Amino acid sequence: MIDLDAARAARAEREPRTLRFGGVDFDLPARMPVATGLAFEAARTGEFLASLLGDQLPAFLALQPDEDDFAALVPALWDEYRTSAGESKASPPRSGRTGKR
């Protein structure tokens, strides 16, 4: 049996993350939701941000992030979530949907 509940419980003690923008701290999930990656792959920026910020999204958007902010945010998120999973920051990104490097 594959018990995702047990695996999730083992990871449950991770602390939420924080994104600071415009002098405001936004809470991010402790683990990157699958919906975040799917929205990014589908180029659905609103869904991507909503999957991370939830009900904080209107406050984030009120600070008027621009394309440069988004361009800085995306690699910082991948780096933050990847390195906390035990990979080094020097690890190359995974390619496509195959999972091969």
Image (cartoon, helix red, strand yellow):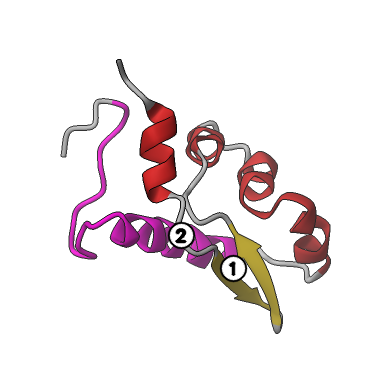
Q: Is residue 83 left or right of residue 72?
A: left
Q: Is residue 5 left or right of residue 89?
A: right
The verdict on residue 78 being magenta is yes
Q: To which quarter of the image does residue 101 belong?
A: top left
- Number of the front mark, 1 or 2: 2
Badge 1: how crowded within 10 Å, few (<14), some, or many (20+)? few
Residue 68 is situated, as x and y percent measured from the top left of the image, at 57, 67
CA gap, disc 1 and disc 2 = 12 Å
55 or 70, nearer to the observer: 55
The verdict on residue 77 being magenta is yes
Give the residue displayed 33% in from the left and 55% down from the top: 82
Q: Amino acid at mark 2?
A: Leu
Residue 94 is situated, as x and y percent measured from the top left of the image, at 25, 41
Q: Does the rendering let one see residue 40?
A: yes
Q: Earlier in the sequence, mark 1 or mark 2?
A: 1
Residue matched to label 2: 77
Query: Which residue appears farthest toward the bottom when viewing the image?
Result: 23
Give the residue displayed 49% in from the left and 67% down from the top: 72
Q: Amino acid at mark 1?
A: Asp
14 or 27, nearer to the observer: 14
Give the residue displayed 48% in from the left and 34% down from the top: 41
Residue 27 is situated, as x and y percent measured from the top left of the image, at 64, 64
Magenta residues, start to end:
68-97
Q: Which label number is shown at residue 69?
A: 1
95 or 30, nearer to the observer: 30
